[in-house]
Amino acid sequence: MLVSTVVWLRRGVAAAVPARHFATESELQQEEGDESDAMTSSGMPSHAMRGAGESDESDESGGSGDEAGRLAGEAAAALTISPELSAKFNLDSYDDDDMDSASILERDVTYMMALPEGTSDPYMTKEDRDDDEIDDITIRGSDLLLLTGVTEEDDFSHLDVHVYEEGDDNLYTHHDLMLSSFPLCLEWCGFRVRTGESAEHGLAERSGGNLVAIGTFDPHIEVWDLDLMDAMEPLMVLGNAPDEANVVKRSKKSKKKKKSKKKPARAKAVAHTDAIMGLSWNPLVHNLLASSSADGAVIIWDLEERTALHRLTHHKDKVQSVRWHPTKPSVLATASYDKSVSILDLQNSDTHVAFSLPSDPEGMQWHPHDENILVVSTESGAVVCFDVRSSSNEPALLLQAHEAAVCGMSLNAVVPGLLATCSPDRTLKLWDISDPAAVTLLHTHESAEQLFCVAWSPDSPFLLSVGGKLTHRVINTTQYDLVARRYQNAGS
């Protein structure tokens, strides 16, 4: 298992009781077709293959066939039914069926498994849902939610939606979603998708706005509704169609099976041609999503129309990260393997500020307590802070944080200057960078495994989620003495 990316959700953005997706008749028929294809692709059913294998083993074992025959005879004798017992229970007529169909397997029972498209079961009401089930999936006001992108040893990838119960220090998986490829980045989006039009007012009805955009090694972006459990398809796909290649079946029953999928709504005119390395949702213009890619481009997407608005090609190599400015809706920062950081104003093409990096970028974040500071982590283990107002290429802070790449970096949104970094060098470090002239290392946590991602909780500021190879945990950092002493009055 490898946890490659982690994101917290703010309290209150998720539905208290998520909806469930129930497979439609067409989805079940498609799944049955896939299962049939899988069985026939080998040339014989699985039970026939087992039989052939067993026969071969018997032939090779010499006298084992005689022994098997003797045991079978003894078993048959032990199971012989007396005539009195057969007459008492009418066993001779046990298999007779008065119905027209010769076998239950020949009857059409699809009506029991699925409903026609666009319909609901008239015999089911909310009151019929099992109270225990509702209690199990209910998200309470005290719960904290976080998302992780996970890849198993067999290359099967999924998005896990976790609930963390802070009072009990209990972390568990609420539900998960099957992904088509290795997850490189996650971005929560508060965009409220148009679901229909109100007959009374003629206004667009919209969803609750709890989405996640996912970038993988595939050249498209999947956007999923986090308030819908057991979904088999993303809410929308931006870019190249996932059904043009084999993608993972969105079902736990066949999570390793490949199939051609029905095409979700997507943008065709402009798209990425390589892996999606970075994503950023605009918190001020909610329908805008920015993506950066290994193809060297940055694309601005319109979530309302599900189309690409702009394609930016100002970098000369892969674009690792992209971040919208927190207070200026048209300002965008990008970081590339050409070892540069760019700050663009999409409303003013003449505004383009660039800074040089000591090595390839890993992560990037606007400082939550100083909107003029951009913080970048690098492959060489450094954390670099740039003042975007400066005309100099010199960084405001250059911190050699780790011996290997700083794959995970997170600035605390509540506690000024509290920085967490992690690395494949198997260390998690906490820093106070509030004074660039006197940076303090608060704590170093040694891990048994490589670490790749880290994120502070926006609601409980000293909770830190850390993920890596074979590990994911939530840490209360107040257990570290120097953190507790320095910030004893913060976040209260």
Image: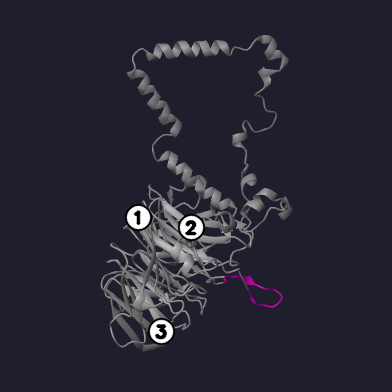
Q: Position of residue 387 (x, y in %)?
A: 36, 83
Residue 1 locus on image (x, y percent): 40, 50
Instruction: Give the amino acid at mark 2.
Output: Val
Disc 1 element:
loop
Name the residue carrying label 2: 474
| Location of residue 272 with respect to 369 vertically, above or below | above
Q: Name the residue that disc number 1 marks.
A: 450
**Crowding at label 1, few (<14), some or many (≥20) Cα neighbours within 10 Å?**
many
Q: CA distance from mark 2 to mark 1?
A: 16 Å
Select label 1 or label 3 by which is in front. Answer: 1
In the rendered structure, which segment of residues is drawn in magenta? 192-204
**Mark positioned earlier in the residue sequence (2 or 1):** 1
Q: Where on the picture, by quarter, is residue 428?
A: bottom left
Residue 450 drawn in magenta: no
Point out the tag, 2 or 3, that comes first from the N-terminus.
Answer: 3
* N-term mark: 1 or 3: 3
Label drawn at residue 346: 3
